[in-house]
Image (cartoon, rainbow, N blue to C red):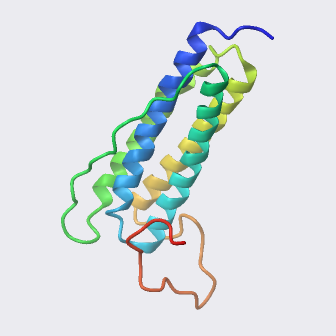
Amino acid sequence: MTTPSPDLLGTLKELHRDKLTLRERHVAVARHVDHYDFNNTYQYAINREDVHLAWLETAIRELGGTPDEVPAAQVPSPGKAGAFTGLVQEDARGAEALVAKWRPRVDGLANIRHAKMVKVILGETLEHQRFFAQIGQGNELVLGRRMPGAGTGNGVMGVRWVE
């Protein structure tokens, strides 16, 4: 077994911090997204980000490190109901910025497994960027059409998970 480069652990920890910061912002914004389909899109993106973070945390621990924590994000209330578009557009730009920062760095990762993991994370982050851009444009079909006659119940729930 080869010893990981000292940069690898630091690089993965930095990506983890960046991705966790983005995820925390998405959680904060989702609290303001009162449109059912758009909120579902946020929940999908947050769920995938949880998977990305789990992959990074495993890799960091395997290299003998400890993942950093970041504070919960605070976003200003957009005001009246349905006025979340500006927050969503910021999220689209934030996802795009993360990919722009990390894409050039992937080729510098000597560990192929970690490089491929980062490529998957960046690819899915671009997918989330497209989702947020579509929400910003008012596209209610981001995740697809509901079955005919299916409704949204009473709208968005106040909590993310119900057991």
Q: Nearer the viewer, residue 60 or 105?
A: 60
Residue at the extreme bottom: 149
Task: Tell me where residue 119 appears, x and y as whole percent.
Answer: 65, 32
Question: Which residue is drawn at the image coordinates 44% and 73% (left, top)?
Answer: 36
Please determine whether, in this image, residue 154 is positioned above or below residue 119: below
Question: Which residue is drawn at the image coordinates 54% and 42% (left, top)?
Answer: 125
Residue 139 appears in the picture as rendered: no
Question: Which residue is drawn at the image coordinates 58% and 17% (left, top)?
Answer: 9
Please determine whether, in this image, residue 47 is positioned above or below residue 2: below
Please determine whether, in this image, residue 5 is positioned above or below residue 96: above
Q: Is residue 52 left or right of residue 20?
A: right
Task: Tell me where residue 147 appears, x and y as whole percent.
Answer: 63, 83
Task: Tell me where residue 60 appears, x and y as whole percent.
Answer: 60, 25
Q: Is residue 3 left or right of residue 157?
A: right
Residue 160 appears in the picture as rendered: yes
Which quarter of the figure is the C terminus placed in? bottom right
Question: Which residue is drawn at the image coordinates 38% and 35% (left, top)?
Answer: 70
Location of residue 85 by image quarter: bottom left
Residue at the extreme right: 1
Task: Tell me where residue 17 appears, x and y as whole percent.
Answer: 45, 31
Please determine whether, in this image, residue 65 is positioned above or below residue 123: above
Which quarter of the figure is the N terminus placed in? top right
Q: Is residue 43 left or right of residue 89?
A: right
